[in-house]
Amino acid sequence: AVVSTQSGHYGRAITVKTFDSVDKLYPKGITNRVATKFRKGACDNCGAISHKKIDCLEKPRKIGAKWSGKDFAPDEHIAETQKLDFEGKRDRGIGYDTTAHDAILEEY
């Protein structure tokens, strides 16, 4: 949200931009939803709705999910667009859940 106020000698608007928190976690990975039939706009190769055939990471199938009608891949989470500042856009650890690291430490 951009908030603007009228102030100053020349009557310029002062804008204050608000950004999302870097600590905000968002879902990653695949969902539990698996299609039972091919959906319009889904990947021709695996049947997931979250990407197209050219972006598919699976090995190209001899007969894709669009034509075979079976063995559909689960959909991936689609991250919502975040409003981040200069540092937030370049933060490599954004969205990292530290409990996952704690589980690795406990295992070893």
Image: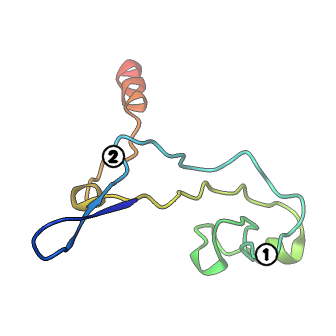
Residue type marked 1: Gly
Q: Position of residue 98 (x, y in %)?
A: 37, 32
**Pick the front one: 98 or 101:** 98
Residue at the spot 65% in from the left edge and 65% down from the top edge: 50
Task: Find residue 42 and name its label.
Answer: none
Secondary element at image label 1:
loop
In the rendered structure, the answer to whether residue 25 lies left or right of residue 57 reads left
The picture places residue 10, in percent across and down from the top left corner, at 13, 77
Extreme residue in the bottom direction = 54
Q: Residue at x 35, y 40 (%)?
A: 23
- The residue at 63%/70% (across/down) is 51
The dot on residue 22 is 2
x, y percent for residue 99: 41, 27
What residue type is disc 2 on? Val
Q: Residues within 10 Å of mark 2 (few under 14, many from 20)?
A: some
Using a 10 Å C-alpha cutoff, classify the residue at mark 1 as few (fewer than 14 neighbours), some (14 to 19) or many (20 or more): some
Q: Secondary structure at mark 2?
A: loop
Front tag of 1 and 2: 2
